[in-house]
C-alpha cells in the first residue's frame, strides 16, 4: 500500500521547518520535562484508571525504563522542535524548544497509535532521514540507529499520550451528565497500548515494560511478533 499523500507532504513541510529554524537560544526540551510527561502514564493510566498498584519491583522497573527512554532522547542531537504547551503554561498551541531530532517525525508517525501498514511507515521514516541528510541535519549516518532512536522516542510519546488520554477520560467521567464521554479516548488508549507493547517487544532493554503494559490490555502480546 502506498502511504497517504498527506504524510509525504507533512514530512516535506517538517524538513523545511527543521532546515530553516535554528535552535540557538531556544529553551531546552530537557530530561525533567520528559520525565514529568512520562509520569502521566504512571499517575493516570495505572494508579487512577487501572486500579492495579505497582509493587516495589514494578516501580523499579518503571524507573529503569523511563531513564532509558529519556536517556535515548537526551543523547540525540538537538534541533528546533514544536512541542505542545503543558496545561500550566496557559492557552494551547505549540512552543518552540531545542529538543531531540526525532521528536517531530516520531509524533507524525506514531502519535495515532499502531500503524496499519508498517512497511509504508518505514518508507516514510527513510524518506525523512534521506531528506534530513540532504539538508545537512545532524541525523545518524546509520539509518538503523536513527530508526531505533525514533522508535524509542515514539514509545516515550505514546506513554505520555496514554497518560493524557486516561486523564481526559477520567475528567469527563467526573463531570457526569454535564459532559458526554468521548468514545475516541477509549479507542485511542487501546491503540496506543498495542503500539507501545509492540515497540517494547522489539528491543531487549524495553521488554520488561511489557510486564506493566499487559495487565492494562487484558491480554498478552504475541511473543512471535517481529518487525
Image (tube, helix red, strand yellow):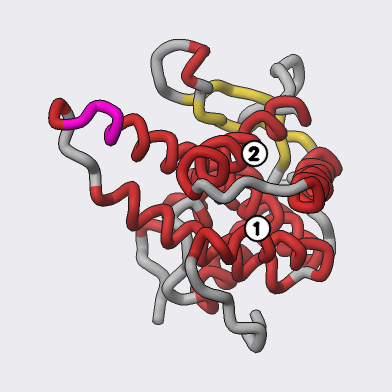
Q: Relative to 164, does residue 138 appear above or below in the rendering?
A: below
Q: Is residue 167 magenta?
A: no
Range of magenta residues: 172-176
- Secondary structure under the numbered disc 1 in the rendered image: helix
Q: Quadrant of the C terminus?
A: bottom right
- Marks 2 and 1, how far apart in space? 14 Å
Across and down, in percent, residue 91 comes to 40, 14
Q: In the rendered structure, find residue 13 and report the number of the disc placed on it.
A: none
Q: State which quadrant residue 220 falls in.
A: bottom right
Residue at screen point 68% across, 47% down: 54
Across and down, in percent, residue 94 comes to 49, 25
Foreground pick, 184 / 60: 60
Badge 1 is on which residue? Answer: 212
Badge 2 is on which residue? Answer: 38
Q: Relative to 16, does residue 129 appear above or below in the rendering?
A: below
Across and down, in percent, residue 155 comes to 63, 54
Q: Quadrant of the N terminus?
A: bottom left
Residue at screen point 33% across, 57% down: 187
Main SS category, magenta section: helix
Q: Is residue 175 magenta?
A: yes
Labels 2 and 1: the sequence-earlier one:
2
Q: Is residue 76 in sight in this rendering?
A: no
Within 10 angstroms of label 2, few (less than 14), some, or many (20 or more) residues?
many
Foreground pick, 7 / 69: 69
Across and down, in percent, residue 103 comes to 64, 44
User: Is 34 displayed left or right of 120 in the figure?
Assistant: right
- Secondary structure under the numbered disc 2 in the rendered image: helix
Amino acid at each position: 500500500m502506498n502511504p497517504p499523500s498527506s504524510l509525504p507532504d507533512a514530512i516535506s513541510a517538517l524538513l523545511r521547518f527543521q532546515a530553516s529554524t535554528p535552535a540557538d537560544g531556544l529553551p531546552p526540551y530537557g530530561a525533567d520535562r520528559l520525565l514529568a510527561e512520562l509520569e502521566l502514564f504512571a499517575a493516570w493510566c495505572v494508579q487512577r484508571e487501572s486500579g492495579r498498584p505497582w509493587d516495589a519491583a514494578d516501580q523499579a522497573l518503571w524507573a529503569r525504563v523511563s531513564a532509558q527512554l529519556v536517556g535515548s532522547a537526551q543523547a540525540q542531537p538537538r534541533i528546533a522542535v514544536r512541542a505542545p504547551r503543558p496545561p500550566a503554561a496557559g492557552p494551547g498551541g505549540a512552543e518552540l524548544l531545542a529538543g531531540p531530532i526525532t521528536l517531530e517525525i516520531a509524533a507524525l508517525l506514531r502519535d495515532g497509535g499502531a500503524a496499519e501498514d508498517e512497511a509504508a511507515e518505514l518508507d516514510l521514516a527513510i524518506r525523512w532521514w534521506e531528506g534530513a541528510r540532504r539538508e545537512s541535519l545532524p541525523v545518524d549516518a546509520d539509518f538503523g540507529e536513527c530508526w531505533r532512536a525514533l522508535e524509542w522516542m515514539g514509545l516515550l510519546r505514546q506513554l505520555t499520550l496514554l497518560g493524557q488520554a486516561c486523564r481526559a477520560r477520567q475528567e469527563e467521567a467526573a463531570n457526569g451528565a454535564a459532559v458526554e464521554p468521548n468514545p475516541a479516548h477509549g479507542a485511542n488508549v487501546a491503540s496506543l497500548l498495542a503500539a507501545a507493547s509492540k515497540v517494547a517487544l522489539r528491543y531487549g532493554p524495553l521488554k520488561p515494560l511489557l510486564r506493566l503494559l499487559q495487565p492494562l490490555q487484558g491480554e498478552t502480546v504475541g511473543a512471535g511478533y517481529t518487525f
